[in-house]
Amino acid sequence: MSKINAIRLVNVNYNHNSIHISDETLHFNGRSTLISLQNGGGKSVLVQLLTAPFVQKRYRNLNERSFASYFTTYKPSFIMVEWVLEDDAGYCLTGMMVRKSQNMDNNEELELINFISEYTEPCEQDINHLPVVESDKKELRIKSFNACHKMFDEYKKKKINKFFCYDMNNSAQSRQYFAKLAEYGIDYREWQNIIKKINEEESGLSKLFAECKDEKGLVEKWFLDAVENKLNKDNNRMQEFRNILEKYITTYNENSNKIQQQEKLIAF
């Protein structure tokens, strides 16, 4: 399974714009990581933002926290997650460029372009070097939404480092994006059905274990369905297993009876 190597947030505002992240990268190095912040520091916000690129539209909101409420200007924000691929296959960058919709003729609150980049070594399309910002000695400037979109399209057309981009307000492209994620072992159903549910409320993990008194309850409530859905990706493997087990039991009983008859004949 792919593991998160790093995350990068660019031009992100929360807590009613009182907290601003200009350009920050957190390195996880493919290991289990604890993010510790004081109350009101933005733990739930960070989880919501990091979940957004991997879930469908209706799952981006978290309780009373609207995902769209974090984006109030024409300037784009970026949410990027880099994954370590299995078997030393390199890295995969999954990202979302988002801003408040500038098109007053549609019903969409946000404009969203998601992108995926695969690479084996540092390059222009990796999480650290993707040129979405320009800096000089005085300030950090974010490129415009349209300039970045054009840049992504050029990467895609030139087929540089397996770069792909998707308009998430286009249903066909949205489906293509989630299908591409699945190629890297990133299943949106796991994020929607497990990760989001755990983080829907404060102390969500405590509530999870309150409903599951022991290991058996935890496995039955949370993991069996996920395992079955994973196995049944191409066809109903669980039903195939049930059929094989049924045939084995039937054959075992038949053979057992025959063996008993043979033993009686030999004894006679």
Image (cartoon, rainbow, N blue to C red):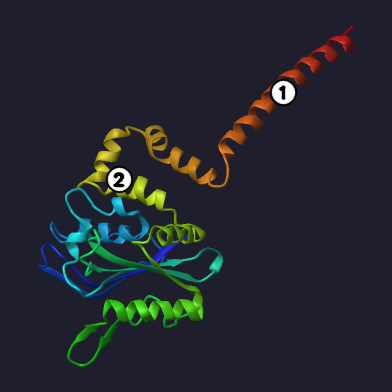
Mark 1 or mark 2: whose residue is earlier in sequence: 2
Q: Looking at the rendering, which quadrant does residue 11 occupy?
A: bottom left
Tell me: residue 182, above or below residue 96: above
Quarter location, residue 42: bottom left
The reply to whether residue 120 is in sight is: no
The foreground one among 73 and 64 is 73
Front residue of 215 and 22: 22
Counting from the top left corner in percent of width and height, residue 41 is at 15, 61
For this orientation, the residue located farthest to the top is: 268
| Residue under the image location 25 percent in, 60 percent down | 108
138 over 34 or under it: above or below: below
How far apart marks 1 and 2 lie (CA) works out to 43 Å
The amino acid pointed to by label 1 is Tyr
Which label is found at residue 197? 2
Q: In this view, does 33 lie to the left or right of 265?
A: left
Q: Is mark 1 on a helix, strand or loop?
A: helix
Position in image of residue 32 (x %, y %): 37, 59
Q: Residue 252 carries which label?
A: 1
Please state which amino acid type lies under the numbered disc 2. Lys
Q: Residue 222: give its label.
A: none
